Amino acid sequence: MAHHTHRLSVQTSGKGFYDFTTQVSSWVRGLGIGNGLLTLFIQHTSASLLIQENADPDVVYDLERFFSRFAPEDSRLYKHTTEGPDDMPAHIRAAVTPVQLSIPIVEGRLALGTWQGIYVFEHRTHPHRRHVVMHATGDLV
Amino acid sequence: MAHHTHRLSVQTSGKGFYDFTTQVSSWVRGLGIGNGLLTLFIQHTSASLLIQENADPDVVYDLERFFSRFAPEDSRLYKHTTEGPDDMPAHIRAAVTPVQLSIPIVEGRLALGTWQGIYVFEHRTHPHRRHVVMHATGDLV
Amino acid sequence: MAHHTHRLSVQTSGKGFYDFTTQVSSWVRGLGIGNGLLTLFIQHTSASLLIQENADPDVVYDLERFFSRFAPEDSRLYKHTTEGPDDMPAHIRAAVTPVQLSIPIVEGRLALGTWQGIYVFEHRTHPHRRHVVMHATGDLV
């Protein structure tokens, strides 16, 4: 029942959703855990982790559009403007979406629902390399 | 110090809050854990988990009203409309509220504050059977 | 690999952000854990936990201003008004920001990114003493 940790990277290319479910579930499968818990933690304050529908791509398209209206790039609204017009909106978006997700492992598999994918939700305009630390612990099979 | 998992269901009947604190704490009590950690994970992207005040029912009434304004059922705002006018608003509400909650177990009890209840927060109009996977681990008493 | 729990308090003096990263990391360091997981849980429904940028103080200033517009103190919007004009907005703010955070411990240190600080995000106007329960488990070094 050791505690496993691993850091992975996700390359982004502008605001929106980057599905990395496969990377996560491969790592978990390799640990040989039966029942346990996986935790994902993103080491940034201008990108988030989100579990969302992975069936119709219009869902994440509409989510991105919604968050652009929710936290507009309007410098009159913010004092913190030195890192560009998209930076303070990015912090706002990151405040209302998760920095961390924990998912039970049941009989060797992540307990995701049928339509749930795991995404990095990028809030900045320019490309970024995002770091996600994973932790898992559980009973070995 | 084994890892325990269990899946429970919560029946909903329209948008709003469904308190299932009792079901959760009964399961935890039965495990005989002294200090440990409980994690709840909902297997859906159109319903959430939320800890909120359980004293005055007006609080969850006002929360539901707030979220209806926050993500309006207005099909002109969304591309994803095939699953009904309440579906895309449901995904938006689920993006800003938790898919997962972890609560410490201290001396055999969930470390909830005096006024904290655990709710399924339903975002769809029609009745749904919502699945929540629970994970717990800890030192036995 | 025991499970450790501890409750700490953070004194607030009005809406805004209170950095308590040092208190958290001192407690974790004292446990002698190599790899593991820390979980923080706030026992309130009108204050939250948030990881945000700790470099430029304008970021948390702008966040507080944003949330004041997001959930305005306007009694015409709410039924729950008996606890003061700031109480229902506080519940709304707490619904969209975390009650709980889990952070991996890697080689004895919290896996925070360079610019990430851990804050109590106070949503009420008057001073409060906020209670945060910490849980940690991991492999001893």
Image (tube, coloured by chain):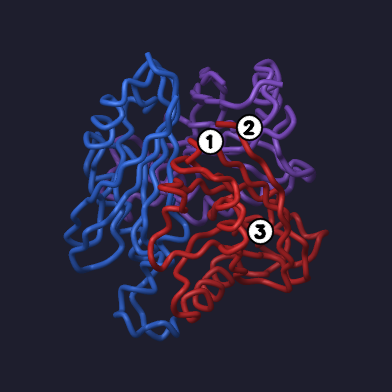
Chain colours: A blue, B purple, C red
Q: Position of residue A71 (x, y in %)?
A: 40, 68
Q: Name the residue furthest front.
A: C141
Per the model, the C-alpha gap separating discs 3 and 2 is 22 Å
- The disc placed on residue C47 is 3
Labels 1, 3: one chain? no
On residue B18, the disc is 2
Question: Does the image show residue B65?
Answer: no
Location of the N terminus of chain C (image quadrant): top right
Please say if the residues under marks 1 and 2 sit with CB atoms less than 8 Å apart. yes
Q: Residue B117: where, in percent of width, then height? A: 70, 38
Q: CA distance from mark 1 to mark 3?
A: 23 Å
- As drawn, B2 above or below C117: above
Residue C46, position as x, y percentages in the image: 69, 57
Residue at x 31%, y 62% (from the top left corner) = A123
Mark number for residue B122? 1
Three-letter code for the amino acid on which mark 2 is drawn: Tyr
Disc 1 or 2, which lies upstream in sequence?
A: 2
Local secondary structure at mark 3 = strand
Q: Is residue A30 left or right of residue C102?
A: left
Q: Nearer the viewer, residue B91 or C97?
A: C97
